Amino acid sequence: MTPILQLDHLSKRYAPGHPPVVNDLNLSVSAGELLTLLGPSGCGKTTTLRLIAGLEQPDSGDVLIGGRNVTTPFAPPERRGVGLVFQDYALFPHLSVLGNVLFGLSHLPRAQRLPRARETLALVGLTVFESRRPHELSGGQQQRVALARALAPRPTLLLLDEPFSNLDAQLRHATRQEIRSILRAAGTTAILVTHDQEEALAFSDRIVLMRAGQAEQIGTPHDVYTQPRTAFVANFLGRSNLLSGTADRHMARTALGIIPLQEPRSGPVLVSVRPEHLRFTDDPAAPEVTIQAREFKGHDITYTVTLDGNRQELLVHGPSDDLRPEGSRARLSVTQPARPVQ
């Protein structure tokens, strides 16, 4: 089956002599997939989205949408069958909700425009607000209007650039879940750009974690989180403890003692141990730590501890009913095999 989107050796730099913002990027997106471009500021994720949309021209490489090459010859955004939703919504303040959705349907025969607009408003749950102006809506409702306007033309691909960043935490979570459900119901293929790790994990079928214009790792949220390939991935997608050690196949000797490995290694090794894979224990053979700080989070507690001997700082997630004072001593054990990383 032909991918909805294919990027072949895509590169872009903004000035001669400067490093590329997007560097030889290859990516394929399937029909109905929800994919997230995740990474820190400057990693190239927004530029990648703009190259897909036709808002920028690549220096080299190709963008194929629905099997059609839209870079050679270059196709502008309105000829790519792509919908765009930005973080500022970009709604027309002088138009009603219905008017905003109708705006993108001028290519349809007049008789089809109003039914299509109302059908899309029903999909996003805003039929009763069709006569209101944007300033009369909440932030989450404005976001759904922007989504409806982008979905109404039935785009081949929907691109979402940090669409939830202007919402407060509670509304952000609710709106994200609503929009994910809407996209699923519509069978829409979508690419989300975000720097928010929780958002990427909750929204995506797959995550592309970007660094310096390249894909550092691509996979399902579960796979990228539980099986990071590099120290960068382990630390950016969630928090992790990185420990040096010496591996002998499925075990490694580290400052936390001898711990099991997910994959066999030999010789010097760097391993990732998630904070939730450490626990306090009464085992007298376990290494000792000093609790330096704690953050109570309701459902659990995050402790910052230092290992006796080398003073390495570690994070530990503990249950909320095991409250330990700062400055106290404890012993640590590892509950899951560690992940070797590069």
Image (cartoon, rainbow, N blue to C red):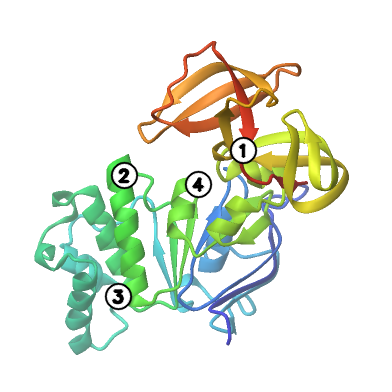
In the picture, measured across the screen, residue 292 lies left or right of residue 152, that is right
Find the distance from the CA under tag 2 to the CA under tag 4.
16 Å
Find the distance from the CA under tag 3 to the CA under tag 4.
29 Å
Which residue is label 4 attached to? 197
Residue 23 drawn at (x, y percent) = 72, 58
For mark 2, does the 10 Å Cα neighbourhood hold few (<14), some (14 to 19), or many (20 or more) residues?
Answer: some
Residue 8 drawn at (x, y percent) = 69, 72
Q: Residue at x 18, y 68 (%)?
A: 99
Which residue is label 1 attached to? 240
Mark in the foreground, 3 or 4: 4
Q: Please say whether residue 192 is visible from this viewpoint.
A: yes
In the picture, measured across the screen, residue 189 lies left or right of residue 65, that is left
**Identity of the amino acid at label 1?**
Ser
In the picture, measured across the screen, residue 236 lies left or right of residue 319, that is right
In the picture, measured across the screen, residue 152 lies left or right of residue 32, that is left
For mark 1, does the 10 Å Cα neighbourhood hold few (<14), some (14 to 19), or many (20 or more) residues?
Answer: many
Which residue is label 3 attached to? 152
What secondary structure is found at the residue carrying circle 2?
loop
Which badge, 2 or 4, comes first in the chain's sequence? Answer: 2
Mark in the foreground, 3 or 1: 1
